Image: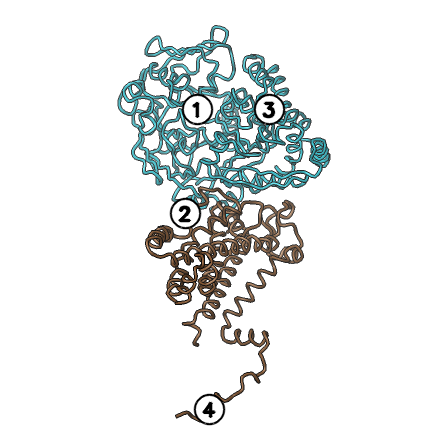
Amino acid sequence: MWNTRLKTLVVGAALLALAVWSFAPPAEAAPKKGGTLKFVVGSKIPSYDGHIESTFGMIHPIRPFYSLLIRVNPDNPASPTDFECKVCEGGIPQPTEGHTKYTFKIRGDITFHNGQKLTSADVKATYDKIISPPKGIESNRKAFFSMVKSVTAPDPKTLVFKLKYPTGAFVPALALPYNFIYSKADLDKHGYKWHQKNVNGTGAFRFVQHQPGAFVEGKRYEKYHHKGKPHLDGYRAISAPKMAIRLQAIRGDRAAIEFRGFPPKARDDLKKALGDKLTVQESDWNCNLMVTPNHKRKPFDDARVRRALTLAIDRWGGSKYLSRIAIVKTVGGVVFPKHPLAATKEELTKIAGYWPDINKSRAEAKRLLKEAGYPNGFEFTLHNRGVDQPYKVVGTWVIDQWRKIGLKVKQWVQPSGPFYATLRKKKNFDVSIDFNCQSVINPLVDVSKFISDDKAGNQYAQYQDRQLDKWFQEMNKEPDVKKQRAIMRKYEKRALDEMAHQFVTLWWYKINPHRSYVKGWKIAPSHYLNQHLDNVWIDQ
Amino acid sequence: MASPSDLAVSEMDFDALPERSWVDKMKDTARKKPLGAVSACAVFVMILLAALANVITFYDPVQNAFDSMHVAPGAAHWFGTDQFGRDIFTRIVFGARTALFVGFSASILGSTAGLILGVGSAYFGGRFDLIFQRFMDIFISFPLIIMALSVVSIFGTGTQNVILAITIPLIPRCARVVRSSALAIREIPYVDAARALGFAHIRIIFRHMIPNVMAPYLIMLTAFLGQAILLEASLSYLGLGVQEPTPAWGLMLQGGAEEYAESAPWIPVFPGLAISAAVFAFNLFGDAVRDTLDPRLRSE
């Protein structure tokens, strides 16, 4: 009796186990060791120094040579709150002293590629260079650390950040992919500009060579501090400024992946040609394309004219069609659309330019132009960057949108260098296309693009709005997320609608088609993130 | 000893011959230069298309029509539509305006400036001519497109700057050819006579020398037309010429070639054909003009 029951139980359990096994999703295959990853990069390397550069042209080939104090979780790069500290003992520390003190414990078994041991003094020297560089030394992201009061390294394993006020913006700022950890000895011995032309990091790969205009080569660092990583023997980042060449490189298997992103048509063509040999990863992108009127030029000093410009743009309709030809898709306000601080669709439709009825919107735009003294519209020039995706495509679209309210617009396109010179130095434009591209999703500081130009280094509309400055500070010092959100809505309404200082057209959409044998890399909502390559492997 | 036939010709009363109409003359020229005639017709059609663009097209060349993106050539859209849903035939017809405006402006300006400088250089001669020609050598040593790219990088993009960018490299090329003809003219006694009468240099150059070098000037001008159209298309293709939404052939090619050559080939193919046809027509036309005006080639 018991024997029969036992047999039934065993058979039943076995059947259940079999059923569970057969319906369970297939487990990710174990990473294979070896191989060289070849990828294409569509931009040049201005210098190797992450602390002064902002381009993916530097990040993609150079980031694998360095470690960061903390980084986004490579297996969950879309999360705005999931970070890991691989150079720490015990992960990311909990803040103390009312969320104003972070004490990191640095591991003692990490070495730079030149054999020197990593200590907290190296991390401190790195953040000193980023946050408070000596006079004459650039640091592109020091504004992200305005909350930091001090950085100290009381012993070789301890690093302490003290903040002026508690803020949720601090930890994401630490995870910026540009914050390469440099050796204090290198900084002391060679100076603060040495890293512009030299590489010595603790990353998964060692620098082998850089043939300017051709490629950057990296080789596996055997003493890398992540056990069992990297999987690759090495990588080669091939320079290919023309999109057609990058596409053909993947198609012809001369390269396996391009990390920035391709437009939808290119994805479709590749998929059609390669079938299962191609895998496509897609994601919302923490980048938006903006329209920036020059407040120092008439008639753009008039808020009614600026409001008319934003009211004329049919974002909801544009999203539907432009997402088929350009790397833009999502309609959103000032905050990354998937973030809890972002406006909901209902909230967005109350902002000028986001109204659901475009005819009503354009009628209001015409009324405003008439009220401002331009009943028949006027002519102006749209300044744009000489890059097709998405700048020129969206530029051509907004010009057509403005035609619908009687504005005659010419386009003035400049290559990237002169384009930035016009925005930053010459400032001789009427209205310009601009962008707000960030890496780690950190809306509290990402929206600094809208504060006064004497506070934000990247606001080119040339206005000062102390109300926005005040709300920006309040948001950053406010620990309660609900209250942060309420302030963010007021901030957004004023920036995009009431004053229409600058306005967002559409948020970008990232499409990464790659050879299916590339495994372990997960798309992030930024082309700057998840580029350490230590978890990437080749399934061949 | 004269033959009877020679006598017959010499004794003919030429005034009694009926004067040939311009139609007959054109027919005669077309028979002698069939390629030239065909190219002249093509150029004429192109000018006509450009002039009547508003009449012969049914769509707005710049307005986006997203409900008809990437439509293949058919009855509604003869050449299909582009990624913004714009009718490609309409944009090609309007693009002829851009091509002709830039082409004619640049070649007329470049040739005329070259004419004046070339004749001036030949007339004054001596050290002025020597130094001036070395400057011309420097300019000529750069390929047309490189020179045009340099000019655009200094002055920026836009229709006017593109005209300037194409004009500047054309000047020394015309000046060099015209100078060689002007050097011969300068030695003819009537120029000395004009000098002896005390005429101003300007008057001698403009009244007595320039009219006598019009043949090489016209030959260069027509030859430059095709080159100027090609240069405009090249600069636009490189993103340094006229800009969207202005219809321009090079720009249309650039916008479609990279992304749509495979899935919507009509987007780059038709602008490419338009560029090829226009340049071919203008080059043939230029050759025909040269053959007609150059005395060495006229004997046939």
Q: Is residue B73 above or below residue A306?
A: below
Chain colored brown: B
Residue nearer the viewer, A343 or A281: A343
Amino acid residing under circle 4: Leu
Residue nearer the viewer, A231 or A507: A507
Mark 2 and mark 3 residues within 8 Å of each other at the beta carbon: no
- Which residue: 54% across, 66% down? B40
Mark 4 and mark 2 residues within 8 Å of each other at the beta carbon: no
Q: Which residue is mark 1?
A: A140
Q: Chain of mark 4?
A: B
- Label 2 sits on a secondary structure element that is loop
Query: On the same chain: label 1 and label 4?
Result: no
Amino acid residing under circle 3: Ala
Closer to the chain start, of discs 1 and 2, is 1
Q: Residues within 10 Å of mark 2 (few under 14, many from 20)?
A: few
Kindly report which numbered mark, 1 or 4, lies closer to the viewer in this rendering: 4
C-alpha span from label 2 to label 3? 41 Å
Image mark for residue A453 = none
Kindly report which numbered mark, 2 or 3, lies closer to the viewer in this rendering: 3
Q: Which residue is mark 4?
A: B7
- Please say whether residue B72 is visible from this viewpoint: no
Q: Which residue is mark 2?
A: A252
Chain colored cyan: A
Q: Which residue is mark 3?
A: A342
Query: On the same chain: label 4 and label 2?
Result: no
Kindly report which numbered mark, 1 or 2, lies closer to the viewer in this rendering: 1
Q: Chain of mark 3?
A: A
C-alpha span from label 4 to label 3? 103 Å
- Which residue: 45% across, 13% down? A148
C-alpha span from label 4 to label 2? 80 Å
Query: On the same chain: label 2 and label 3?
Result: yes
Q: Position of residue A182 (x, y in %)?
A: 34, 21
